[in-house]
Amino acid sequence: MSLDLQSLVRTIPDYPKPGILFRDITTLIEHPEGFRESVERIAAAHRDMGFTHVAGIEARGFIFGAGVAIALGVGFIPVRKRGKLPGNTIGQNYALEYGVDTIEIHADVLNEGHKVLIVDDLIATGGTAIAAVSLIRRTGAVCENAAFVIDLPVLGGADKLRAENVAVSTLMAFDGH
């Protein structure tokens, strides 16, 4: 019997600012069976699709993405904020509410022979995920799939990713933001 994973996600009102309902996955990952089942469900939905790597977006995407990579028997790529990776990197800018930020991967990790699954804990507006897709595609690798634990459909990020020809899968959705 499968767990109700959504019931394991805590909602914290007015965090990080008034009017926001923060969906806290720490209660899910603190639950051993819930954490394991989350990783297994994402991996099962993407098994036998030919992935060579899973790219996890900093920071909570590392938690789920590393587990999915292990379950799929593929490499893991950390997608980090600018300046956090040693060695040569390539970056991609993306818009924030007030400004611009940059994510990076190692410059020598991907090429045309690779197929990458993006994994993160939550898809909201989609800015970081779209930047990750662009960054991965710039290497010549194929990036046509993304998986998230939580979708916030009202913010439209999953639809924006689909408009970039990325198939999106999620384990659950929450109303509001």
Image (cartoon, rainbow, N blue to C red):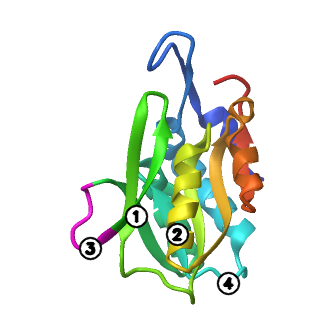
In this view of the protein, which residue sits in the foreground, 105 or 58? 105
Q: Position of residue 154 (x, y in %)?
A: 73, 29
Upstream in sequence: badge 3 or badge 1: 1
Which residue type does callout 1 highlight? Answer: Pro
Spot the residue most to the bottom: 113
Principal secondary structure, stretch drawn in magenta = loop
Vertical side of 23 occupied by 28: above or below: below
Residue annotated with mark 4 = 50
Element under disc 1: strand
Image depth: mark 2 or mark 4 in front = 2
**Quick one: SS at disc 4?**
loop
- Magenta segment, which residues? 83-89
Residue 100 vs 76, above or below: the answer is: above
Ranked by sequence position, the earlier of labels 4 and 1 is: 4
Tell me how far mark 3 sits from mark 4, CA to CA.
27 Å
Mark pair 4, 1: CA separation:
19 Å
Q: CA distance from mark 3 to mark 2?
A: 15 Å
Query: In this orientation, does residue 17 appear?
Result: yes
Q: Please, what is the three-letter code of the amino acid marked with disc 4? A: Gly
Please tell me which of labels 2 and 4 falls first in the chain: 4
Q: Earlier in the sequence, mark 2 or mark 1?
A: 1
Please, what is the three-letter code of the amino acid marked with disc 2? Answer: Ile
Q: Is residue 86 left or right of residue 89?
A: left
- Amino acid of disc 3: Asn
Q: Which residue is mark 1?
A: 78
**Residue bearing mark 2:** 136
At x 75% / y 51%, what residue is drawn?
2
Mark 3 and mark 1: Cα distance apart in space: 14 Å
Badge 4 vs badge 1, beta-carbon distance below 8 Å: no
Residue that numbered label 3 is attached to:
88
